[in-house]
Image (cartoon, rainbow, N blue to C red):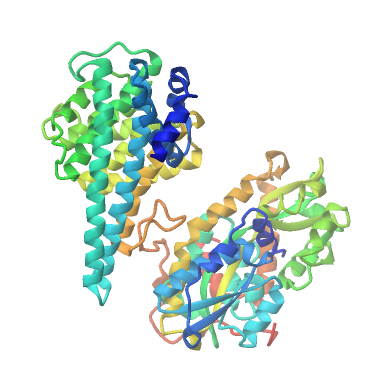
Amino acid sequence: MLWLTLSACVLSRVDNSTLTQVSPEVLAISDVGMACAVGETTVPLMTAMDDEKLRRSIAFSLISAAMCSEIRVWDAELERRQAVYLAGISSEPATWSALATDAAARETRAHLEAAQRNLWVWEALEAEYGTVGEECPELEEEEQVLYLMGLASGSLAVLHDGAADHALDINQGVARQVERGAACLDSGALWGVPGALRASVWIAVPGAGPEDVDPWVQLEASAMLGDSQGVWLARALHAQAAGAAGNSEALDAAITAHKVAMETGGSPEHGLLNDYSHRTIRHESDRIWMSQTGHRTESGRFGSQPGAELEVDFDLDAFFGPETPETPAEPLMEETSP
Amino acid sequence: MNRRTLLRAAAGVLVLAAGLTAAAPAVQAQDTKTVCVYDPSGKNGDAFKQAVKYQTAAAGMGVTLTLKPYTDEAIAAQDFANKQCDAALLTGVRAQKFSKASYSVEALGLIQSYDDLGSAIKVLSKERASKLMVSGDYEVAGIYPAGAVYLYVGDKEIADVRALAGKKIATLTFDDAAMTMVRQVGATPVPADIGTFASLFNEGGVDVCYAPATAYNPLELHRGLGDTGGVIRFPVSQLTLQLLIRSEEFPAGFGLQSRGWAASQYDTLLGVVKKGEASVPAKHWIDLPPEDHQRYRDMLTKVRGELTAKGQYDPTTVALLEQLTGQ
């Protein structure tokens, strides 16, 4: 009831043009948490206004709202992995096993929510521009970003639905549609993301890609392009694809490259995309750390493997010679007490 | 050397410790080991923050730690020596009372790059090097980077080591190595401490002081540099923080495990150091020509040799690190 009252109050003061102007600006917020909160708040408002002109704005807000679900998925997944890890070393494995099962249930529910929100974006995209993958739509410059995000949402909808036991029964063919739709966009003008999106589909869907192109090479090239333009979304797709495919070499490379890109700094105009991308790549790192150590990537250790050998090119055996009793380092010198 | 300056500098940036300390795990007195943590900003500084992080890691090694902040390093070292605490986090120059080997990482002119410093810390954390890290009752349980120490000159004309003769250099009284170096270049040491060296330099009481680049902003050393001075981009030594333990108070093998953990933190802490260095404006860096570099290197090599011969540095560790760094 309170929600309805508040909504009515806000609706009386927020007109169409406000929402049309404000929603796309959400993408400039360099804070996924804030953007997702805005998305979750504005989608019901805009939907209630039932205005055709708001369709694109709703899509932007849904994209932001779907990021909330993504974060819930990640957190539940990490909690599940943590509980599994602790079950393996604890004297009370049954306790941790129950917690792992609980986390897994929350993870599945979050996947379902993410699938639904991304599906709504996909449906809004097709309602606006027609069936994806048939004909390339004529897009204004500012529409290209929305179209691109919509394609990414289609891909995410399929993935999340699969993780939610196909609860929404989303057509698996959407992935191939996404691939064809991405071919309509200029990858160079969109930070390598269309190219990375296509390559991700080629990797995930057997037979979807051309035989003469190595998808991993294209993925890396696209991600490098994005990094050089200060937008990290293609790199996030690179890391995600590598994580999903179990390609640890590619995942290490993606994480390392992202660490370098962060030191250079991202494009300030694309704050939300970069924050989302960073969180996506960090999650891939967290997965590894959680499974091996029981905690997320240690602060400041992003880019390092947990428990990595302290490799250094120096032969101590050659320096010290054979293992024999040696003169110890000189103990306390002049002062006996500080 | 002004080794506490980095800590003071970093404290100006970070506001952390109260909450982190509150988050320390509950402990039982009989199982707890106490660490005397030197940080000029107490619980609000970078060193204490690192100690809190270490507290978590140590719990995984089977040791529960209580952290006790000290803003006076001499008292922290004294309390450690007097068994008021089982471990201490100190700068290398203070830690030399407990381990000449780990202090040798800070030897004048020995380590010229952060890559070499990282390698040195990793090598010393290896099991084969453990004998160097144990000294009587004491053991080094970790070495952390805290920034290269640079010379700050009030006039770029005296950046050449030969021009330092006759100049006044603020020198910390408890740092024998620095005193030896100042005399070697024919300069006049002006006794200073942590609280006075920056004002001595900024107000023209001395011509030169030395500190990590992270001291530049918090201590307003730009005032002493003015339009004519600069920071010589040549690491005179490496400032480090060192964790010392009294071995008998800890489980067997703890020191080695702890050194490995500390070495794994190198890149993280180096990031803080590099941010501090990036904060020095380009106009205030002085890049010496190669021949001037060589003169500094020669001078410091000579001083290091003298100090090693006198027992200020551990000869085995110095030899190891000279080999590691290709000197």
**Which percent across, then down, holds residue B234?**
66, 52
Quarter of the picture holding the C terminus of chain A: bottom right
**Which percent across, then down, holds residue A332?**
63, 85
> Which quadrant would residue A171 be assigned to in this image?
top left
**Which percent across, then down, holds residue B40?**
69, 66
B311, A333: nearer the viewer: A333
What residue is at 41 percent from the left and 81 percent from the top? Answer: B253
Q: Residue furthest top?
A: A138
What residue is at 78 percent from the left and 51 percent from the top? Answer: B153
Quarter of the picture holding the N terminus of chain A: top left
Q: Indicate left or right for B314 with A92 as reference.
A: right
**Which percent across, then down, holds residue B21?**
55, 68
Q: Is residue A300 above or below residue A271?
A: below
Residue B257 visible in the picture: yes
Callout count:
0
B244, A312: nearer the viewer: B244
Q: Is residue A153 above or below residue B287?
A: above
Residue A273 visible in the picture: no
